[in-house]
Image: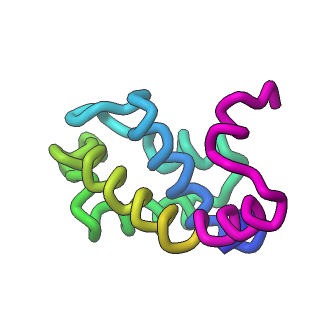
């Protein structure tokens, strides 16, 4: 799915997922509150809550009532596995077809200054 066509709550999930994968939030770290993250992203707090709820359902965060949400143990690895599968299934095939059309190899890309 094209990022521009994604619902806002999925875009917000992507931002948090990328932050976990990039090490900005490590296992056990507290995520920003719904209100803080909504303000940072210019989003509706209910939309942020929906994004966070999905993380909770997927076991990627744990909730400490009255304290906040924390990155769950193993979340980074589970996100990496899911995103690798998505890349191989959805992102790579059109890239590979375009490379074949243009007679580009992986070596061409690695050597490229672009």
Q: Is residue 94 within the magenta segment?
A: yes
Say which quadrant the C terminus sits in. top right
In the rendered image, residue 105, in percent from the top left (x then y), is placed at: 67, 49
Vertical order, 69 against 100 (above or below): above
Q: Main secondary structure of the magenta part?
A: helix
Q: Residue at x 70, y 39 (%)?
A: 109
Q: How is the image coloured?
A: rainbow
- In the picture, measured across the screen, residue 36 lies left or right of residue 71, that is right
Vertical order, 87 against 94 (above or below): above
- In the picture, measured across the screen, residue 71 lies left or right of residue 114, that is left
**Extent of the magenta region:** 91-114
- In the picture, measured across the screen, residue 85 lies left or right of residue 26, that is right
Q: Residue at x 28, y 67 (%)?
A: 58
Q: Quadrant of residue 20?
A: top left
Q: Quadrant of residue 53?
A: bottom left
Q: Is residue 74 within the magenta segment?
A: no
Vertical order, 14 against 3 (above or below): above
């Amino acid at each position: 799915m094209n990022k521009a066509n994604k619902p806002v709550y999925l875009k917000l999930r992507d931002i948090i997922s990328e932050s976990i994968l990039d090490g900005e939030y490590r296992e056990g770290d507290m995520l920003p509150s719904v209100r803080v993250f909504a303000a940072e992203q210019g989003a509706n707090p209910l939309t942020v809550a929906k994004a966070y709820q999905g993380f909770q359902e997927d076991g990627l965060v744990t909730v400490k009532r009255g304290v906040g949400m924390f990155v769950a143990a193993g979340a980074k690895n589970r996100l990496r596995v899911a995103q690798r599968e998505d890349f191989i299934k959805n992102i790579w095939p059109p890239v590979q077809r375009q490379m074949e059309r243009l007679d580009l190899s992986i070596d061409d890309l690695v050597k490229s200054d672009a």
